[in-house]
Amino acid sequence: MKNVTSILLLALCLTVRAYAEKPAAAPEPTAGPSAERLAELTKRVTQKKTIKLEDYLAKVAASNLGYASQRYNVSVADAAIMAARVFKNPEIQISGMKDVTNYGSSQQLPGFYSAFITQTFETGGKRRERQLVARKNYAAVSTSLQGFLQNLRLDAAAAYADAIAMGQVAAQFQRTAGLLKDLLKAQEERQKAGDISDVDLLQTRVEVRQYEAELLDAQGKAANAELGLNAFLGPQFSSTHWVPVGTLDVAPQTTELLNLLSSAIRNRPDLIAMRYRRDAAAENINLEKANRVPDVTVGVGWTNSTYSGNATSPQPNYNMAGVQLSLPLPIWNRNKAGIASAKAQAEQAQLDLEAAEVKAGVDVRQALSLYNVARERVGLYQAGVLKDVDAALEKRVVSYKRGGSSLLELLDAQRKANEVWQSFYGAQSDYARAVIELHRAAGIWIVRF
């Protein structure tokens, strides 16, 4: 018998060892996108459509997948409120005992069968405080979702402004290339007539080819900026090439520092969400204080004792009903640690809020400073630089036709005019972004251009 037992123990040990040393199975490859999803993501760009900023931002809000994902945070917070309302489930206990020593004989002792149902009742207002904390957290999550959407709209508006600016730069190169092509045709006719040398014609031809190359580069950048607008949209728009319409003549709602600071403190979603989290942390102190109060457990039960004909201890069949009341005695644990932790978290939340409010003021002042610089840059161009450079180019063309200027001087004037216009469009783009960032810092979410 001992040998058999030893063999069984050895076999068991070997089995356990073999199981422990068995290499883990390789994870199954994750499923890739479905055929429909793959087809949607790999659509070719087949159509161009013009779109206004308001329509574009509406499509962003309706189709952006990141925003759709963030909305689930609100659903999770709402489920937390539902969980905070729920009462504890009752418990049922069923037990039975029977004499197995004298089982089947006339001396068998009685058996006992019992069933108890117990219910724990929360005291001290725990359920109420738990719901208050959950509601504050829900408000914070909802406000954060609103902030995500508003920042998403501002980011999309900035991309829209960049696309407009890139299109304007490409249009300027197109105009310059067209002017140089006209000049090249005129130069070819003058060369045939003997009015200019072959060198002037070749120089003009080189400049035309150079501007055509720069035009292709500008058009490519403009197209990329327009295609980048789809990054804020859902996959259903992946086959559309959006062409933004409008100008970059945008003005902020206000430039008064006091109004901007007041708007930032009152309206920025990140600050509002932090206030809700601070309030939730304060409510959590009350919840931890309520947790000091012991919960009461009440139960009712039924017990049956079966008949026994045991000669020593005969017993008839009978039933018993009973109630029970239990609660822990808060002698050693009064939840001091939980209360102290909740107070520290509440104080930390308040300090975080105050720090964020200070930073919001800094953000507003910095954004306003950048806006003023960008506005002055645009103003300088609009005050006369653009007119002067166009007038200088026009006079240089007239002078060249009359023989008063060389071809190199004309081409240099043309290139200078092109650079000034490009710089102006860049300044306009920076100005539009400055307005957007000023609105972002101040918690203003309306941008029109």
Image (spheres, grey):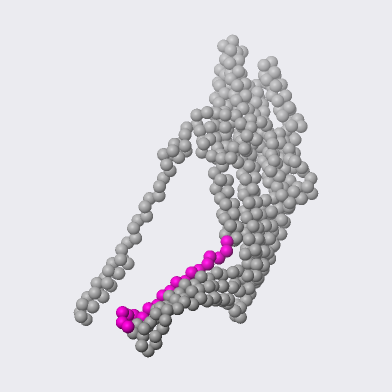
**Which residue occupies the foreground of this view, 45 or 134?**
134
Q: Name the residue located 57 percent from the left edge and 59 percent from the top edge.
A: 83
Q: Name the residue located 35 percent from the left edge and 82 percent from the top edge.
A: 108
286 up-or-down from 425: above or below: below
Query: Magenta part of the protein: which range?
Result: 86-106
**Which residue occupies the foreground of this view, 95 or 63?**
95
Residue 362 part of the magenta segment:
no
What is the residue that sits farthest to the bottom in this orientation? 312
Residue 69 x/y as whole percent: 55, 48
Residue 443 x/y as whole percent: 70, 47
Rendered-image quadrant of the N terminus: bottom left
Q: Is residue 320 left or right of residue 177?
A: left
Residue 93 x/y as whole percent: 47, 71
Q: Name the residue located 43 percent from the left edge and 75 percent from the top edge.
A: 113
Residue 88 part of the magenta segment:
yes
392 up-or-down from 108: above or below: above
Q: Is residue 6 left or right of residue 249?
A: left
